[in-house]
Amino acid sequence: MVMILVVLLVIAGFVVFTYNRLIALIEAIRNNQKQIDIQLDRRFKVFESLINVVKKYMDYEQTTLKDVVALRSQAEQAKANGDEAGRIAAENKISSIASNINVVFEQYPDLKANQNCMQLQEEIVSTENKLAYAKQSYNDSIETYNANKKSFFTSMIVGAFKSKLDFDFPYWQLSEAKVAEQENYTVKL
């Protein structure tokens, strides 16, 4: 009688231990899913903020360049026509633009278009690496869960508690269409 009771306790202990282990694995998978969501959100925010910064600076730079070229043409034309007042006005406007550039560079001493692009590239690479790691961790946790739930005795416990323990989590992978889309993707500034 004592032997039967000990055997039943061992079996009950194994069931409880296995059940709790599978629940822990399921929760780890769900946590890893949330980590992917966090990295996707981070990627979105990094792309948005850095592209906007680069866009604003490049727009500023392009506008400034266009203005300087137009004013320089006006100054040259005024000089050729002997219009000294027109030339001075155009050159003064160029000086005004130059002083504004100095103010911008004083506020942001390292602000250069190529550095912004480098920063954008570095942030994107960093974010993509973190996202790839989160996806790998998620897929690894699914693999661990699936291997455990398919093992001999554990599969019987999973069968007994199907609604609580038997899940088919999809692996994180890209569709062929998405792979083709990403290969053709370019950042538009």
Image: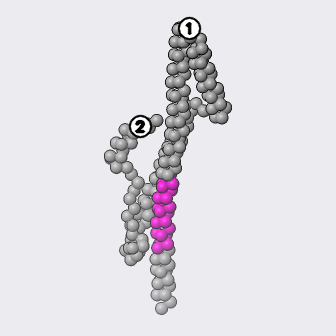
Residue at figure coordinates x 47%, y 58% from the top left? 33
Q: Secondary structure at mark 2?
A: loop
Q: Position of residue 112 (x, y in %)?
A: 58, 30
Q: Is residue 98 visible?
A: no
Name the residue type under label 1. Answer: Gly
Name the residue type under label 2. Answer: Thr
Q: Is residue 129 above or below residue 73?
A: below
Q: Secondary structure at mark 1?
A: loop
The disc at residue 127 is: none
Q: Position of residue 14 (x, y in %)?
A: 48, 76
Gap between marks 1 and 2 measured at Cα: 49 Å
Q: Which residue is mark 2?
A: 186
Q: Report the magenta residues as a range.
A: 18-39
- Asked if the residue under mark 2 is in contact with the one under mark 1, i.e. CB atoms within 8 Å, the reply is no
Q: Is residue 177 above or below residue 57?
A: below
Answer with left or right where residue 151 lies relative to residue 99: left
Q: Is residue 58 above or below residue 5?
A: above
Q: Which residue is mark 1?
A: 82
> 16 or 74, which lies in front?
74
* Residue 146 in which image quadrant: bottom left
Majority secondary structure in the magenta region: helix
Answer with left or right where residue 91 lies relative to residue 19: right
Coloring applied to the structure: one colour
Residue at figure coordinates x 64%, y 34% from the top left? 108
Residue density around tag 2, few if under 14, some if 14–19, many if 20 or more, within 10 Å: few
The residue sitting at the bottom extreme is: 1
Q: Position of residue 135 (x, y in %)?
A: 46, 53
The residue sitting at the left extreme is: 177
Q: Position of residue 170 (x, y in %)?
A: 38, 59
> 3 or 182, which lies in front?
182
